[in-house]
């Protein structure tokens, strides 16, 4: 197995960065486990998104510890945590901030002063994002893509790192607004969060109905997290594996020459090139998290569904036959042939 020592002349320093990455990840998981029971897959996906520098959308019912998980991770990372509770009357300025007129008491002169909104943090929890209309949802678009926001023609940079974790209720519930496709495409993952097992629910009851009060320790910093994001991008991927990712994403598009019949029948729109970029990046982070220095097909398979499930738009045929995105994607993964590694 190749190591970074073999791949880079600055081997010693790079190896230290890799070892620090593994130590920090283990410490983060240890701290989160002081508070959160179960949800291993969702926790892994949130950590991958952090190490990639992407955003994460979590779909699940209330009471499944979404907010608690994000706040705990923010405390362990030493990052500033902000939360926005999305409601039907929330305005874009409630998110980005706004300009107000202030008067200088000594001179009597008035001037515009920008008051920052809750978006100016490191980890932003957009709670129940589909409870607010598209106009307010769109206030996050520039921030998620450009890491900045524009108010009255002035561009304000957001602190780095900047990470949005949005939660949404299942779309079939009343009083919800489906997220626009352009905004969904900005999310690295769409993680689905389900109820815990019986034993895990019993553990939660035991932990939360006593006087126990877990104290979360900070294990890293914003600067170190930015360094980890660069480290992840250095993980190599074979040309054959990268080509498989491109073929898989192209097969989600019904107008593609290589898409199967079931995609042409049930899918209106497939994934963009951003989907292929995110699959590769998240697979690199997963490989490094498991102390491997190259991307395997197993890494691709583990991240393909949460990356793609919110990027394919199904038509009325799929809805009438009760076929969801996960079923289409599972069939697609079995359909697209793997290429031999060169």
Image (spheres, helix red, strand yellow):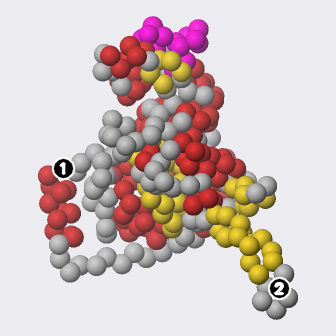
Residue 339 visible? The answer is no
Residue 169 visible? The answer is yes
- Secondary structure, mark 1, is loop
Residue 134 drawn at (x, y percent): 54, 42
Density class for disc 2 (Cα within 10 Å; few <14, some 14-19, many ≥20) is few
Is 205 on the left-hand or right-hand side of 41? left
Residue 194 drawn at (x, y percent): 28, 45
Q: CA distance from mark 2 to mark 1?
A: 64 Å
- As drawn, the residue found furthest toward the front would be 108
Please check the rendered image and state whether residue 26 is part of the magenta-colored stretch, yes or no.
no
- Residue at 73%, 55% in the rendered image: 150
Q: Which mark is residue 9?
A: none
- Residue at 39%, 53% in the rendered image: 43
Circle 1 is placed at which residue position?
A: 197
For marks 2 and 1, give the one nearer the viewer. 2
- Which region shows up in magenta? 252-265
Q: Are marks 2 and 1 in contact (CB under 8 Å)?
A: no
Circle 2 is placed at which residue position?
A: 108
- Secondary structure, mark 2, is loop
- Give the prevailing secondary structure in the magenta stretch: loop
Residue 335 drawn at (x, y percent): 43, 15
Please check the rendered image and state whether residue 257 is part of the magenta-colored stretch, yes or no.
yes
Q: Quadrant of the C terminus?
A: top right
């Amino acid at each position: 197995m190749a190591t970074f020592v073999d791949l880079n002349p600055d081997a010693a320093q790079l190896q230290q960065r890799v070892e620090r990455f593994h130590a920090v990840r283990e410490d983060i998981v240890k701290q989160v486990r002081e508070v959160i029971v179960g949800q291993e897959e969702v926790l892994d996906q949130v950590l991958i998104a952090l190490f990639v520098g992407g955003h994460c959308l979590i779909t699940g019912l209330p009471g499944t510890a979404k907010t608690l998980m994000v706040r705990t991770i923010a405390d362990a990372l030493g990052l500033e945590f902000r939360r926005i509770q999305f409601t039907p009357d929330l305005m874009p300025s409630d998110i980005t901030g706004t300009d107000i007129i202030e008067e200088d008491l000594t001179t009597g002169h008035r001037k515009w002063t920008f008051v920052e909104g809750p978006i100016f943090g490191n980890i932003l929890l957009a709670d129940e994002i589909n409870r607010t209309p598209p106009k307010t949802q769109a206030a996050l678009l520039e921030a998620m893509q450009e890491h900045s926001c524009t108010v009255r023609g002035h561009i304000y940079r957001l602190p780095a790192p900047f990470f949005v974790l949005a939660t949404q209720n299942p779309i079939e519930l009343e009083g919800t607004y489906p997220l626009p496709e352009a905004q969904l495409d900005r999310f690295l993952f769409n993680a689905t969060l389900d109820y815990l097992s019986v034993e895990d629910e019993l553990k939660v009851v035991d932990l939360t109905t006593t006087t126990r009060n877990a104290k979360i320790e900070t294990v890293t910093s914003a600067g170190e997290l930015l360094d980890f994001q660069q480290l992840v991008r250095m993980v190599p991927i074979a040309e054959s594996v990268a080509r498989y990712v491109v073929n898989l994403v192209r097969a989600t598009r019904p107008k593609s020459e290589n898409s199967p019949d079931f995609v042409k029948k049930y899918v209106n729109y497939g994934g963009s090139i951003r989907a292929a970029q995110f699959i590769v990046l998240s697979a690199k982070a997963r490989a490094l998290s498991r102390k491997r220095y190259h991307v395997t097909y197993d890494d691709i398979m583990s991240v393909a569904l949460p990356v793609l499930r919110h990027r394919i738009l199904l038509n009325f045929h799929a809805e009438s036959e009760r076929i969801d995105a996960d079923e289409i994607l599972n069939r697609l993964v079995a359909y697209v042939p793997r290429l031999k590694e060169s």
